[in-house]
Image (tube, grey):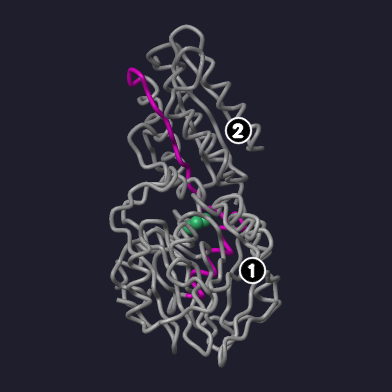
Amino acid sequence: MHREIKDNIYWTGAIDWKAREFHGYQTRFGTTYNSYVIKDEKNALIDTVKEGFESQLLERLEHAGIDDLDYIIVNHIEMDHAGSLEKVLEEYPDVQIVTNKRAKKGLVDAYGMDVEDVKIVETGDELTLGEKTLTFLKTTMVHWPDSMVTYAVEDNVLFSNDAFGLHFASKKRFDDEFDDQEMGKIFNEAAKYYANIVLPYGRQVQGVLDQVEELGLEFDIIAPSHGIIWRENIPEILERYDAWSSNEDQEKVIILYDSMWHHTEEAAFTIAKGVEEKDVDYRVYNLSDSDWTEIMAEVMISKGLIVGSPTLNGEIYPAVAGFLTYMKGLNPVDKITAAFGSYGWSGEAVGKITDIFEELDYEIVDTHKWIFDADQEELSSLKTLGENVAEEVIDSD
Ligand code: FEO
């Protein structure tokens, strides 16, 4: 069923209960592709849904009594929002697409679409539908070059596209329909979403938040393109975006490793003892059997990062190398770090990990590598490594 979110504004999106992976992102609770329609003298659809889910969108439009569409606002051309655009156009051939210049180019590049009649909007432009007015705000690189958001002026509804979204499939649409326990899960999913999708663009997020303040926009509803619609917890989600995008982190250390014969694993737990000795919070993850998406949310909010790897054929062990590549792209900043690892005959992995830390401009507090099983002296050094990182984390406050 469609769902009214404000007077004559309806959610008409699609629920994807089965989604478990989203270009490397583990979506264990599924997701939604949110689309919205505004009913007025002229009807406007805000974004479509992922290809293959258009039947849900079209059914909900029908249930909402939408016989005709005048505009489709394309806030973002990525395939989970514009992938079914051409199929929706087949149903509503006379509709006009409204988007920004960069997205218009994207519609050609990604879908080979004919864009001759596309209406281009810039930040601050208005589109009158009848009683309702829409205005637009380009949010370049939050998180794609074409990204923008749409604001329903009279209703104070922000259609924020990917911003403020989360991957969470649910029958419930609004945050205030969930109890406190469920809201804990939802904020956790929002943090994971930010850490794995938006994190590289913190400066741009700060710019958008400043612009929202300058324009004096007020929000009764923030309606993103994934997951739940914010109605009761708007100050909280705005506050969290401000904290995440300004790289506020906690006095916490994340210890990540993989191991061939448990030597590097034993070291990880010995390092953890050192961190614990200093009474600093920490978590330990084996990268080969843990959810990287969850780990990224932990790395984002933690000041300390310790990474361990054995050396395999002169390289970092595959799971560790893969995670560091993933993390490097997301570019969490200002970490206090150390690297460690067991080796059999050469031991290049630790140096290669610190090379990555240097590229990311991290403070490297300590490194330690040793041959095969760590003896008591090595274990003592590893515990000290944990203590050293924890002390630096405490001092950085
Ligand atoms: Fe939800 Fe950038 O797509």
Mark count:
2
Q: Quadrant of the N terminus?
A: bottom left
- The x, y position of residue 388, in whole percent, is 54, 34
Of 268 and 57, which appears nearest the observer? 57
Observer-side mark, 2 or 1, equals 1
- The x, y position of residue 79, in whole percent, is 48, 54
Residue 339: numbered disc: none
- The x, y position of residue 8, in whole percent, is 44, 87
* 251 is higher (above) or lower (below) than 269: below
Picture residue at 58% right of the left edge, 78% below the top: 151
Of 378 and 126, which appears nearest the observer? 126
Magenta region: which residues? 234-262
* Membership of 256 in magenta stretch: yes
* Membership of 155 in magenta stretch: no
Q: Residues within 10 Å of mark 2 (few under 14, many from 20)?
A: many
Residue identified by numbered label 2: 357
Give how far apart the Cα atoms at labels 2 and 1 are.
48 Å
- Secondary element at tag 2: helix
Residue 117: numbered disc: 1
Q: Is residue 324 shown left or right of residue 358?
A: left
- Secondary element at tag 1: loop
